[in-house]
Amino acid sequence: MAEKKVFVTYKIPDAGIELIRKKGFSVKVHSKENLITRQELIKNVKDADAVISLLTDKIDKDVIDQMKQCRIIANYAVGFNNIDIEYAKSKGIIVTNTPDVLTDSTADLTMALVLACARRLNEGEKMMRRKQFKGWRPELLLGYELKNKIFGIVGMGRIGFAVAKRAFAFGCKIIYYSKNKNPEAEKFFNARKVSLKTLMKNSDIISLHIPLTDKTKNLINSDMLNLMKKNAIFINTARGEVVDEKHLIGLLKNKKIFAAGFDVYENEPAVNPELLKLDNVVLLPHIGSATIEARNAMSELAAKNVISVLSGKKPLTPVN
Ligand code: DGY
C-alpha cells in the first residue's frame, strides 16, 4: 500500500508532526517564511491524503476540486470560515477544527484586552516610552473598575463561557446573547440570556465569541453599535467580519464609546489606517490562541484527527 501523504500548509509546532510521522505517514511541511500562495496550495493538495491548514488558507471549491485523494482537511484553528465545509462534505472530505484546547488562551487574551481598554494600558505604555511621564497626578489616565459592570457576552459557547468565568471573578454581572440557553453559565455566574439589542444597550463591556458564518456576518451592524453606552468597551477576539468595523471606528473617533480592543480585523492582515490613529483602541495581531500550551495542543489535535481518519476511524472533532 502506498504511503499516505500529509500536507501541512505552514510550519506548526512539532508535537503533532511527530505524532503523524510516528504512525508511518509521510509529512510535507510548506515551511517557507511566507504564507502559502494559492498556486502553491493548489499544487500541493493534489496528491495529499490529508491537509493541515491555517485559518488564513482559503480552501474554496476551486481548491477542493484539486484534491484528488484527500480524506481530511484538519484546520489548525477553532474557526473554519476559511473552508467551504459543505462542498468538502459533498466530495467526501472530512473537515476538523481544534476546539477546547485554545479556550483558556483565548479567554485570557480577551480579559487582557478588557483590562487594557478599561485601564488605558496602551496610552500609559506609550507615555512611558515617549518619556512623557512627569510624575503621579490625581487624574492621570483615569479608567474604569470592572466590579459591578455589566459584561455582555455575544455567543455563550466554550470561549464565551470561559470569559464569563473570568469576568464573574472580577465582579461583573453577566448577560449573554446566544442561540441556546446556557444553564451552567446561569447557575454558576448568574448569567442572564437577553436579546442582542438589550445586550448592546445595557452592557458596559461587550465581547464577541461567535463564529463567522453567513448568519453572523455583520451581525453587529451600525444599528446595533449605535445602541452602545458612552462608557462601553467593545472587544473582538472572534472574527472581524462579524462587525461593521468602519462604523465602530466612527464611534471611537467621535468618543461615542470609551474604547475597543481588537484581535481580529475585517480585512486581515490589513488594518484600517484610521484605527492606527486612535488612542482609545488596543490593537493585537490575532494572537487569541498564541500560547505555547494552546498551540502545541492544537498541533496534536490536528494530527490526531488526521491519524484517525487516515487509519479508517472517526475524526475527533469534525465540523461537517
Ligand atoms: C481560531 O482558532 O479560530 C482563532 O481565531 C485563533 O486565534
Image (cartoon, helix red, strand yellow):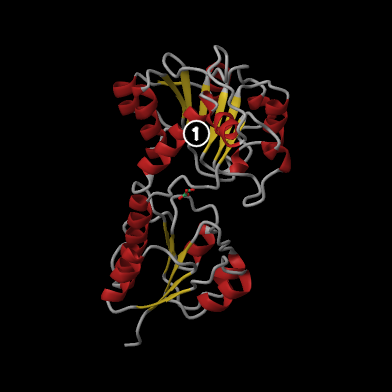
Q: Tell me where residue 246 appears, x and y as whole percent.
A: 71, 36
Query: Residue 20, located in which quarter of the rendered image?
Result: bottom left
Along the viewing direction, whichever of 159 and 60 lies nearer the viewer: 159
What's the residue at 62%, 52% (across, down)? 269
Q: Is residue 229 left or right of residue 86?
A: right
Quadrant where the N terminus sits is: bottom left
Q: In the orientation shown, which residue stands out farthest toward the bottom? A: 1
Q: Position of residue 232 (x, y in %)?
A: 57, 21
Q: Disc 1 designates what residue?
A: 113
Residue 117 percent across, percent down from the top left: 54, 28
Give the camera-side residue of 156 and 250: 250
Please name whichever residue, 135 or 12, is drawn nearer the observer in this view of the structure: 135
Left or right of 225 on screen, residue 97: left
> Which residue shows up at 51% across the image and 24% down it?
119
Instruction: Please determine whether, in this image, residue 246 is positioned above or below residue 203.
Output: below
Image quarter of the C terminus: bottom left
Q: Tell me the crowding category of disc 1: few under 14, some 14 to 19, or many 20 or more residues within 10 angstroms, Cα based.
A: many
Task: Name the amino acid, label 1.
Answer: Leu
